[in-house]
Structures are given as C-alpha cells and as structure tokens.
Amino acid sequence: MPSDHIKRYPCKIELGRWFYVDAILSLCLYAYFLISAWFFGSMLILVLVLSMIAVRLAMLSMFTILSYELDATHLIIRSGLLRQRMLLSEVHEILPSKKPLKLLMIYSKFRQKMDIPSPQDRDAFLDDFASRPGFNRDGDRVIRRENQPAE
C-alpha cells in the first residue's frame, strides 16, 4: 500500500441531520431575542445572544461529520473542524465496547482508553487496521502482535 494512500471510513452514527434541525430552531429563537434586544436597546442581551450563536455554530461544525482515516502511520479521527491523529505504533488493541451504542474501544500503548463510534463498515475498518504491520485480527478485536512491541 502506498504511503500516501488514505482510506476513509465514515461513522455509523449520523448526527448531522439532528444538529441542522437544532441549529434552525436555535437560530429562530436567537433571531427573536436579537429583535427583542434591538427593539428594547439592551446591549447585554445582544452580546449574549451573539455569543450563544457563535457557540452553537461551533458545536454544529464539530459534530456534523465524523469519520476515520487510516494512512501508513496514523489513525486520523475527524469530527467537523477538529482532527485528532494517533500513531498506529501507539495502538495496543481495538475491541468492541460493551456500552449500548455501537462503539469501539482503542487502547494505546500507555493503556489509555478511547471510545469511538463504530465506522459504518466496521469489519472493513478492522481488516484494514489488522493488515498494518504489527497487528492481527482476532474475531471482533485487533491486537498488536506480541513479537512486535510498540515503538
């Protein structure tokens, strides 16, 4: 696999539609408050409403798109405008969570646990991860081979 080839796995949980509905309803409410603040001349309400709009839009951008990308050396977790990179050499194990949502748990080399929503095609994601040097797939788990310690 070429080092510049990045495989993308969209998340199973679609949050985007709900956040758009929430954003539209919130913007209608904020518009009402803005008109009220403008009409009554209250600068404090105007500043508070504008800051609430900014926070709501930031939250909307963070949760609308969630996907995972695997390249030659990193697992990249994208959530809207945010991006988190994890070295594959730091991953110790990936296994399904026992929580009600369809989650995967990733254990890093420092035994830190991270729960992430499963990709739509969890099997393809796990197969792709297991095909990386140093990993094996064991059922629903991907584990680091014992003869290849994390770097």
Image (cartoon, rainbow, N blue to C red):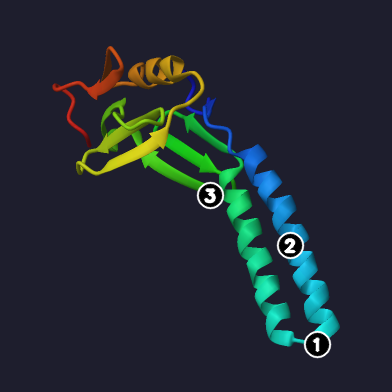
Which residue bears the numbered disc 3? Answer: 82
Q: Amino acid at mark 2?
A: Leu
Q: Which marked residue is nearer to the observer: mark 1 or mark 3? A: 1
Badge 2: how crowded within 10 Å, few (<14), some, or many (20+)? few
Q: Quadrant of the C terminus?
A: top left
Q: Which residue is mark 1?
A: 41
- Residue placed under numbered mark 2 in the picture: 29
Quarter location, residue 74: top left
Q: Amino acid at mark 1?
A: Gly
Q: Which mark is residue 149?
A: none
The residue furthest left is 147
Q: Quadrant of residue 27?
A: bottom right
User: Looking at the image, which residue is at 58% across and 54% down?
Assistant: 59
* Nearer to us in this view, 26 or 149: 26
Mark 2 or 1, nearer chain start: 2
Circles 2 and 1: CB atoms closer than 8 Å: no
- Does 124 sit left or right of 99 as displayed? right
Secondary element under disc 2, as helix, strand or loop, is: helix
Residue 113 horizontal/vertical position (percent): 27, 41
Query: Measuring 70% from the left and 80% from the top, which residue is drawn there?
Result: 45
* Residue 134 visible within the image: no
The mark nearer the N terminus, 1 or 3, is: 1
List x then y, in percent, for residue 36. Answer: 80, 76
* Circle 1 crowding by C-alpha within 10 Å: few under 14, some 14–19, many from 20: few
Q: Could you say which is closer to the camera, residue 127 or residue 134?
A: 127
Q: Which element carries disc 1, helix, strand or loop?
A: loop
Estimate the spatial distance between the alpha carbons at disc 2 and disc 1, rounded to whole Å: 18 Å
- Residue 85, image x and y in percent? 42, 43
Foreground residue, 90 or 107?
107
Task: Identify the mark nearer the N-term, 2 or 3.
Answer: 2
Q: Is residue 82 shown left or right of residue 97?
A: right
Label 3 crowd bin: few (<14), some (14–19), many (20+), radius 10 Å? few
